[in-house]
Image (cartoon, rainbow, N blue to C red):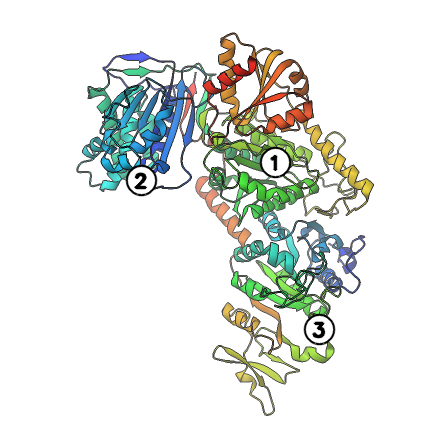
Amino acid sequence: MSQLTRKDFQTNQEIRWCPGCGDYAILASMQKVLPELGIAREKVVFISGIGCSSRFPYYMNTYGFHTIHGRAPAIATGLKLTRPDLQVWVVTGDGDALSIGGNHLIHVLRRNVDVKILLFNNRIYGLTKGQYSPTSEAGKKAKSTPYGSIDAPFDPIRLALGAGASFVARSIDVEAAHLQGVLHRMASHRGAALVEIFQNCNVFNDGAFVTLTEKASKARSQLHLEHGKPLVFEDGKKGIRLNGLEPEIVPVGDGGVPESELLVWDEKAQPALAFLLAGMGPAFPTPIGIFRAEERAVHHELDEALQRRVTETLGDGDLEKLLGTGDTWTVP
Amino acid sequence: MGIPPPDSSTKPSRVLDTVTIRFCGDSGDGMQLSGGEFSRASAFAGNDLRTFPDFPAEIRAPAGTLAGVSGFQIQFSSQPVYTPGDRPDVLVAMNPAALRSNLADLRPGGTLIVNTGAFVAGNLAKAGYLANPIEDGSLDAFVVHGVDISKLTEAALHGSGLSTKEIARSKNMFALGLMLWLYQRPTEPILRHLQQRFAKKPEILAANEKVLLAGHAFGETAELFAGTYVVPPARIAPGRYRNVSGNQALAMGLIAAAKLSGLKGFLGSYPITPASDILHELSRHKNFGFTTFQAEDEIAAVSSAIGAAFGGNLGITTSSGPGIALKQEAINLAVMAELPLLVIDVQRGGPSTGLPTKTEQADLLQVLFGRNGESPLPVIAPATPSECFNAALEAVRIAVRYMTPVILLSDGSLANGQEPWKIPEIADLKPIDAPKRTKAEGFLPYERDNTTLARSWVAPGTPGLEHRIGGLEKDFLTGSVSYDPENHEKMVRVRAEKVRRVAQDYAPLEVEGPPDGRLLVVGWGSTYGAIRAAAAQLRSRGLPVSHVHLRNLNPLPMDLGGILQRFEKVVVPELNLGQLSIILRARYLVDAVGINAVKGKPLQVGDLAARIEEALS
């Protein structure tokens, strides 16, 4: 196979996202990463649901299927079970994955189906022009909630951890290097891998993640999770320490606590730790990176093993024998 | 293996042509087992037969109540039979509730075998009897045989070490043994089957065998019965046979279809009565390389099948009416994406949860028109349990040839009813051609075959053919998203024309009875047996009644219009309020008259014949 480039993954379709949409950056990162994976283009499939993010497959020169609202994980499950040779990516949004498709999302994660899920979270319904979404903050004023939403939001990270996901990560549309690193890890992960990508909808929810992306504030707002490293932010000046089950922000270095007291990130630890971190709240920086990466049995491999075991016991299926199962009699 | 001789009896026997028996009792009484085993024995005796299990939706309603009554009816004959029989000639009632809820069906002068041991004050009260019907003369119109089956079963198992409950559960075997004796059915195939079924529970097996033989011996020795009955073997086409239910035949048909097409079979399904047995059956045969996936819901079930089809495999989903309603959006995606998909709807009584265990044909309009937009797809409907096998093959053939979802309409009575099936020779089954495109040059995802208008099927993984499809309207050739008004109309029309062309592959319709004249009965699905029998009955009385049965409900056969025109009157019996009638009226401007019933039960031959005769006058 000749070396593929970013261009090989671009299509001739006119991209119809709004100018300035965060989706462009995610698309570019994906097109950058795919040629680096050493996988043949025809072996890659993008399955999406409905929403702005779900237009993604049209812009990827691979196999692609733009399906129906919320069902991409279920479609991807049937594809992966019957075509384990393919690398299957699911592209979805906060409405698609967490509202109409919530059921399928939790089941694809608990089954550990070997699909890579890109969850674009802009905390708003974009394609239907600006209603609050299941990740919108409580009190959100939007087209369908002019007086503020009364619903508590979902946290996709904690939802995925609760569903038993074997790989859970978070990244940001404009943090290209970080996002690409996560995409690489997802591609090599065996089993269901979900990344929540904070994505700016500059038309209906502009600036939702501005403190995380603005140069002035990002150092104190982003907390990078790196396996085996202590949790520090603000250029190493502050860190996270666990006091019992309560995380706390502590100064690090001169006059602060020694690094040895900080929480060292472990992506294979009890999921409760990742859960705790994901829920630290607004007084804390926002964790970015890989919350959890665990090796566990992969759905299609279990199915293949089962099929092999049954075949070893019963022998290869014999249609003639099957049709004549049970009591038969012959009419002369 | 030939037909075993009937077990010998010292009492005189009378020859009968056709008999209908209904076993009924509490849900926990094992009536389905008794009925099933009696059917097995009748098949071995060489009879033609049809069965109808009828059970409540509740797993175990309170014992002894009317709600908990479960029944199993079989018609067996030395002649061809097409239905499970209208009214039983013999009713076996294991308790007062069973008697009360089934007695009205017993033919006047029919035989009633009642388990007198269950006719105690408590059970009588639960069934709403003020007095014991066995004693108060209310059963005088019937030939009543009171047998204390409870006590005789206890006596047979005295000292067996089994619990009272286990002993009580064996009494169905006594009733079965008695009936086997009465109709001179062989016990050997039953014993053999019981040995398989209870191989891991030797004490239960021993008890069942013992009670079965006790029931058989009771018939022979007790003074109650003057003699036995013989229903001679039917004249059936030579070959090897087995009994088969519609759900079993469908499951085997799906495995056969995968094999004949060389496609990997994939069933995505969510449990629902009365379709679950197809999932159960296919789950047992993983050694055929057939994948079964119990999804998280109906939508995921069909979606996973679509995913499998997109991957180049044979995607199938099974459900019943409420599940089909949930699947419609995804089915429409397969219409738009033009992917082969098989959707099996085992219909049940509706609307909503309706009558989960009862039969109905009221999903026809749902499957034809229950999706948004102009969304045509082929619909096929087998007419008998054994026809379900070929229907599965045909549905797959259409789906892959025309690149379209296909809906197969079965129903509760086909699903659970059994009939003898001549086991097909594998060599006689036609391969199913399911080609995939691999040639990259000149590839346009929505370019169509001239004959079928099908686009080509490209499995991901094929180099050089990478492309994107989806639910948005497609450009006529490239398949790219297109909002162009002219293109949309063109695509709507070409999808319709593609489905219309499916009819070019049909065999000509067969009209039973006169090819033209006074009255044509048009039926579809499981009403076949009742219509066929009723029409034959009327013809035997010299009445001009013809019958055509539709296996293809969309597109309708091209010769149907001509046939309809040759008759003065068209009547359409259906287990709904007239869904096919609506279609026939709209399509052919014919004054189709409905004969409709929605009782959750199959049509009865006698009733139907009377209503057809009425339509003649």
For label 2, count other residues whose C-alpha is less than 10 Å away and answer few (under 14), some (14-19) or many (20+): some
Viewer-closest of B169 and B399: B169
Please tell me whether residue B246 is drawn above or below residue B444 in the rendered image: above
Disc 2 versus disc 3: nearer the observer:
2
**Can residue B442 be seen here?**
no
Say which label, 1 or 2, has the lower sequence index: 2
Label 1: which residue?
A: B367
Q: Chain of mark 3?
A: A
Disc assigned to residue B602: none
The amino acid type, in three-letter code, at marker 3 is Val
Q: Is the C terminus of chain B in the top left, top right, bottom left or bottom right quadrant?
A: top right
A216 left or right, relative to B294: right
Q: How many marks?
A: 3
The amino acid type, in three-letter code, at marker 2 is Ala
Q: Chain of mark 2?
A: B
- For the residues beneath circles 1 and 3, the answer to whether they share a chain is no
Disc 1 versus disc 2: nearer the observer:
2
For label 3, count other residues whose C-alpha is less than 10 Å away and answer few (under 14), some (14-19) or many (20+): few
Residue A163: give x, y in percent of width and height.
52, 60
The answer for how far apart the CA atoms under marks 2 and 3 are is 67 Å
Q: Residue at x 68, y 51 (%)?
A: A43
Please tell me whether residue B127 is drawn above or below residue A107 in the rendered image: above
Q: Is the N terminus of chain B in the top left, top right, bottom left or bottom right quadrant?
A: top left
B573 left or right, relative to B555: left
- Give the SS element for disc 3: helix
Residue A211: give x, y in percent of width and height.
69, 75
Please identify the quarter of the rendering in which residue A176 is found. Answer: bottom right
- Give the SS element for disc 1: helix
Label 3: which residue?
A: A210
Label 2: which residue?
A: B63
Residue B357: give x, y in percent of width and height.
45, 36
